[in-house]
Image (spheres, rainbow, N blue to C red):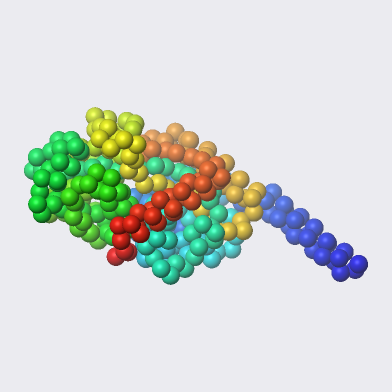
Amino acid sequence: MIRSLARGTLVALSLLAGLAHAQTYPSGPIHLIVPYPPGGGADGIARNISDELAKTLKVPVVVDNRPGASSTIGINAVAKARPDGYTIGLVNMAFTANPGLIKDMPYDTLNDLAPVGMVAKIPLVVAVHPSVKADTLQEYLDLSKQSKEGLFYGSAGNGTSNHLIAERLKKLTGANLIHVPYRGGAPSVVGLAGNEVSMVMVSPSSALSFFQSGRLKPIAIGVDQKVANLESVPPISDTVPNFEAIDFYGIVAPKGTPPEVIKTLNEALVKTVGSETVQKNLTAQGNIPFTSTPEYFADFLKHEVKTWGELIEQVGITAG
């Protein structure tokens, strides 16, 4: 009887402590871990939202870059952090592809992290070198099929979003495309501009200046909606029905973070992404602001892990 009472008291005290934590949260700086180096697209997204998120939560939000190992170093730091809401992480498509690419993952993607909410979708643009005799995606696909050797396309590296999405496009259309991995997104764009490859699927922000100068030619975009500075580019779905080519960004926290804290973070994130400043900054770079509930994000992540895992197995893609 005494033991039962003691256990009940401990449970009650634990619940009260969690409630007190939620009521006072946040009371100090929040660290937003970005699993990529400074200066890239992920870093830009993080810094776009961190200032406004800090204003909403009324505490500093510190961007902490932890690059390496296809984002697993930074996200592992989030997974192993204390689940109190003071360490969160930015994830993208690599987060959902890694389980299919990496045998010995340092964390369980779907079980060791708690989804907070989405931030943005990033449409990929099918960009070709101006010398390529194709002004539409259909013409490019036909050109590849007419080539005995095939056409070379570049990516940011094995297993990256533009590699996986291009392989899905190749599988669905029967295009004769040969993959050339580069060491990052910027080198792949430079390689395309230098006519080393015929095509790269790029984010609008990474190639906009190349489009405007005529050094690259955009022939299709991965969403069925208008994107800033690329309004005249037709969607891939005009050629391949229901095909989307998007990366995404979202926020996760360590598993075990109290539901009340997740709710506070999610509400702050929705308000932040909905602010005029963040909306303007994201759309100017060709990104699509997009928020969600934690539940929606959890279902989205499960679907993405399954989708890319199946493709990786079918095509035989390995991390590089």
Residue 21's x, y, as percent?
Answer: 68, 54
Picture quadrant of residue 256: bottom right
Query: Which residue does the image show at 86% across and 65% down from the upper left?
Result: 4
Q: Is residue 252 left or right of residue 71?
A: right
Q: Residue furthest right?
A: 1
Residue 125's x, y, as percent?
Answer: 26, 41
Q: Is residue 266 left or right of residue 150?
A: right
Q: In the rendered image of this protein, does residue 270 appear above or below residue 161?
A: above
Q: In the rendered image of this protein, does residue 289 appear above or below residue 156?
A: above
Residue 121's x, y, as percent?
Answer: 39, 42
- Residue 59 seen in the current view: yes
Q: In the rendered image of this protein, does residue 253 appear above or below residue 273?
A: below
Query: Which residue does the image show at 67% across and 51% down from the upper left?
Result: 22
Query: Which residue does the image show at 75% across and 60% down from the upper left?
Result: 14
Residue 126's x, y, as percent?
Answer: 23, 42
User: What count of labels does the image hold?
Assistant: 0
Query: Which residue does the image show at 87% across and 64% down from the upper left?
Result: 5
- Residue 47 seen in the current view: no
Quarter of the figure that contains the N terminus: bottom right
Picture quadrant of residue 99: bottom left
Towards the viewer: 177 or 86: 177
Q: Is residue 12 left or right of residue 303?
A: right
Towards the viewer: 315 or 196: 315
Quarter of the figure that contains the C terminus: bottom left
Q: Is residue 197 left or right of residue 257?
A: left
